[in-house]
Amino acid sequence: MEPCKNCGSSFDGKYCPVCGQKKFELPDLAVKKYFTSAFKDFTHFDFKLLKDIPALLFKPGYLTSEYISGRINRHIKPITMFLWLNVLFFLIGYTKVLPQAKFMAANAYWRGLKQKGYAKAATENISTAVYIEKFDHHFTSYEKYMFFVIIPVFAFLVFLLYSYQKENYYVKHFVYSTHFWCYFLIYFSIVPDLAGLLNDFIHWLTGTPLYTQYDGMVFSIILLAGIVPYTFFALRKVFNERILFTLIKTVIVAYLVIQARFWGISFTYYLTYLTT
């Protein structure tokens, strides 16, 4: 007999008679099973989401550590959490992390793309205003799927970073990646608005705002303030390495986050250009 990873009860066989969870081994976390069970759960609201969000925000790495340790049934599945949060983020958070100027910001993510768009409009004999309107509409349609691409790519990069560890299963990093980007969605649904309120208050109080433009330096400060400390504590919890190694990995992973966002947006821009 051995204890259930989820509830601690001892049992023989494949399923725990107390909580019903299947006997857990890390290799059982196949990617196919990971997705199918999560999408099945998404068909009904799981109130574990409300319980797990505080842990996600204030206990970095805890949910990932719980999942890869086999304590699965007591928490909402990572992909299910992401699907629900993606709905929330699409409603209130996308403008805070994606380019607000859409077509007019294209060259910042793919050099020369605006000029290619103007040339395409001329070739199709439509006005630039009509083309820009179509482009922005398509961009809005595609951007909500961006994180579905970022999560597996980011997970693969972290998988390579920890390739020297034993039991370095890709799905372990996929769970970490999913939880991290869930945190990212919530963070950017809340913090930029709080910064805006603070900016308005300072402007009212002193007559001079803290900042006049959100994009650029302000966005970078908000981004780094949110991901660097969170990443350090999450990596420390999940991968259990020395502080110095974790600090080095934090810098690398923070850089990967910035690049994943940048290239995700760049890909979205180019895909929009191809289909507009």
Image (cartoon, rainbow, N blue to C red):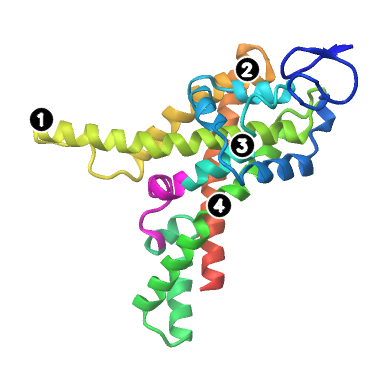
Q: Is residue 112 visible?
A: no
| Residue type marked 1 | Leu
Q: Write the start and end of the magenta stretch as one range.
A: 88-102
Mark pair 4, 3: CA separation: 13 Å
- Residue 62 appears in which quarter of the rendering? top right
Mark pair 1, 3: CA separation: 41 Å
Residues 197 and 211: in front is 197
Question: Residue at label 3?
Answer: 178
Mark pair 1, 4: CA separation: 39 Å
The quarter of the rendered structure image containing the N terminus is: top right
Front of the two marks 1 and 3? 3
Residue 146: image tag: 4
Q: Residues within 10 Å of mark 4 (few under 14, many from 20)?
A: some
The reply to whether the magenta stretch includes residue 93 is yes
Q: Is residue 274 visible?
A: yes
The residue depicted at 49 percent of the width and 47 percent of the height is 87
Circles 2 and 3: CB distance less than 8 Å?
no
The residue depicted at 59 percent of the width and 32 percent of the height is 179
Circles 1 and 4: CB distance less than 8 Å?
no
| Residue type marked 4 | Met
> Residue 88: where, in percent of width, then height?
45, 44
Circles 1 and 2: CB distance less than 8 Å?
no
Question: Residue at label 1?
Answer: 205
Q: Earlier in the sequence, mark 2 or mark 3?
A: 3
Dot 2: element: helix
The residue depicted at 79 percent of the width and 31 percent of the height is 169
- Residue 237 appears in which quarter of the rendering? top right
Residues 64 and 48: in front is 48
